[in-house]
Image: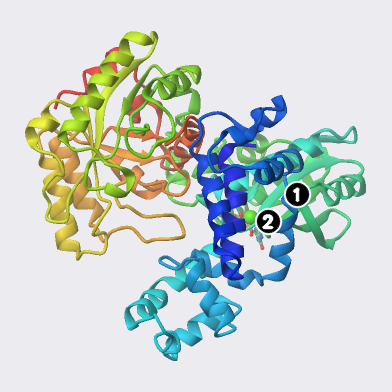
Amino acid sequence: MKNDQIAAVFEQLSDLLEIQEANPFRVRAYRSAGRTISSTAESFAALVEEGADLTQFSGIGKDLAKQIIEVVTTGQHSQLTELRQQIPAGVVDMLRIRGVGPKKVAVFYNKLHLKSLDELKAAAQAGELSALKGFGKKTEQSILDNIDLAAEAGKRISIADARTAAEAIVQDLQQMKSVTKTAVAGSCRRRQETCGDLDILATSDDASAAMDRLAAHPLVDSVLQRGDTKQRVRLKSGVEMDLRVVADTSYGAAMQYFTGSKEHNVVVRQRARDMGLKVNEYGVFRDDEQIAGATEEDVYAALNLPWIPPELRENRREFEMAAADTIPRLVELEDIKGDLHMHTTASDGAASILEMAEAAKARGLKYIAITDHSKRVSMANGLDAGRLRAHWDDIRTARKQIDGIELLCGIECDILEDASMDLADDVLAEADWVVAVLHYGLQQPRAQIMKRLITAIQHPHVNIIGHPTGRLVGKREGADVNMTEILQAAADYGVMMEINAHFKRLDLDDVNAAAAKDLGIPIVISTDAHSIDGFDVLQYGVDQGRRAGLTKDDVANTKTWTQFRKLLKR
Ligand code: DGT
Ligand code: CA
Ligand code: CA
């Protein structure tokens, strides 16, 4: 278990207790434990395994230490499980609304007895929220503005949660003697940024045994449906999963069919019909004779198509590319040689410069940029010119303490609401690497947002625009931008564009990243790591790049350090 996962347990616990209006000291104790755990560089799972004394950490007493041990060893927290049963799931959903925390939810639940997003929406529309003590029209309107997005997101899970669950279950099924192949299909295999449900496939001559095994898996809560070859279960996290068990001879056809997307498959089926063939989940058929089906390659080949990577199967350009024989060789995680966006304890990160550098090096990276926040982000302890210069001195010192990896003196500099940069030009001129970003005023009208981004792109010392729209997947729409104009300006001024790899951002998204590629803009896939575990998200950024059709050549941080350093000069 990672620290972030352990911390999430205590954060949820404090949220639910706060909704129950429990003793504020207890709420605070759990919240601070969560913060301590997520901001500690050492692994709590490892500490528990070693039998280390957890009370050495601030805010962690004997009782909390016991609970951490419970979480690490059982993957569960008994009190949290109990609370989840007491508080309706629809109440917990309210926490997903932007600007709504446990204190407000407590009022909605305890005073107005609202139990779901639908009920909350109706109450807001009826003006019942603004009639409450301590609530105004503004809060009510903001809830109405954001509640639909929260409701939509609730039905889908992040690609990170999807992959973690689906891959764990696939690995478990793979242990079975009677199972020959297992794989993840559906949107999760296509690496879509969110998944509605999970789809997995197995080949076996004993479907019933595979279904029993899935039903007994620790992640599974209950079986919703069971047939001869298909089972649908609900996981404890609430997400549902389809398992299909097929014969070896149909494996490729079933993978093709259940990977989707529906839109891609419509074209595949039509193509088959045009050739006098039929495709379904069992194979490709001419009359009643199966002519392909064991592998996906065979299925596509039977339709005179090259194998199409799952990430491209959205009926966007893949058939056009297949016809022109230009299906790209997509970028891979192993191609990435540098990470150009990360934080340290100098702003809101959990690890030191050297700890981040060591961790990056251990993952095979050859160069990194340390890009702490600029002063506008005071919540994250952003740096002013004086602190930044001292921090850069520390980076230069760290360079001498580690071999085999290059450290760039960088900054994540805010583009202020008035379109000026948060740090003076002479300071930015001293940086090796400037990531310009929007954090505040994302709701400004399009004209002002555009002015801010274009001004930053034209700035002589800006290298890249970080998380360009500021969107949060399923939580917050990005700023209102004309992306075509932004990308054109970036191309004109030689500014790079980031794919922020964090699964909550994935910004640029796949469509915009494809547009950036078309303009020849170098794209950098960066983690925005705030701890040494933060590098884990790199794969999600690479997957987003793959969905955009990016090859190794399109991604600047696949270059060797010698090649990449030439791109630093504008
Ligand atoms: P999701 O779950 O909303 O994130 O998206 P998908 O793509 O995983 O969709 P899902 O789970 O409904 O189905 C998985 C794949 O199975 C889908 O991409 C295509 C295939 N599929 C599902 N239902 C149908 C159907 O009624 N007709 C056809 N042709 N294909 C289907
Ligand atoms: Ca699905
Ligand atoms: Ca499904």
How far, Cα to Cα, is label 2 from label 1? 8 Å
Quadrant field for ligand 2: bottom right
Q: Is residue 419 above or below residue 340?
A: below
517 shown above or below 99: above
Q: Is residue 531 left or right of residue 441?
A: right
The chosen color scheme is rainbow
Residue 360: which quarter of the image? top left
The quarter holding residue 22 reads bottom right
Q: Amino acid at mark 2?
A: Ser
Residue matched to label 1:
219
Q: Is residue 397 above or below residue 229?
A: above
Give the numbered dot on residue 237: 2
Classify mark 1: helix, strand or loop.
loop
Camera-nearest residue between 564 and 94: 94
Could you tell me if the residues under marks 2 and 1 are in contact, i.e. CB atoms within 8 Å?
A: yes
Q: Position of residue 495 (x, y in %)?
A: 19, 36
Point 61% across, 40% down: residue: 300
Question: Where does residue 281 sit, x and y in percent of width and height?
Answer: 73, 51
Q: Position of residue 294 (x, y in %)?
A: 75, 37
Residue at the image point whose x is 45% and y is 68% from the top: 100
Along the viewing direction, whichever of 540 and 60 lies nearer the viewer: 60
Residue drawn where x is 23% and y is 20% of the image: 393
Q: Earlier in the sequence, mark 2 or mark 1?
A: 1
The yes-or-no answer for disc 1 within 8 Å of ligand 2 is: no
- Can residue 184 be seen? no
Pointer 2 local density, CA inside 10 Å: few below 14, some 14–19, many at least 20? few
Residue 32, percent across and down?
52, 49
Residue extending farthest left? 426
Left or right for 564, reference 485: right
SS category of the residue bearing label 2: loop
Query: What residue do we see at 80% from left, 47% from top?
Result: 218
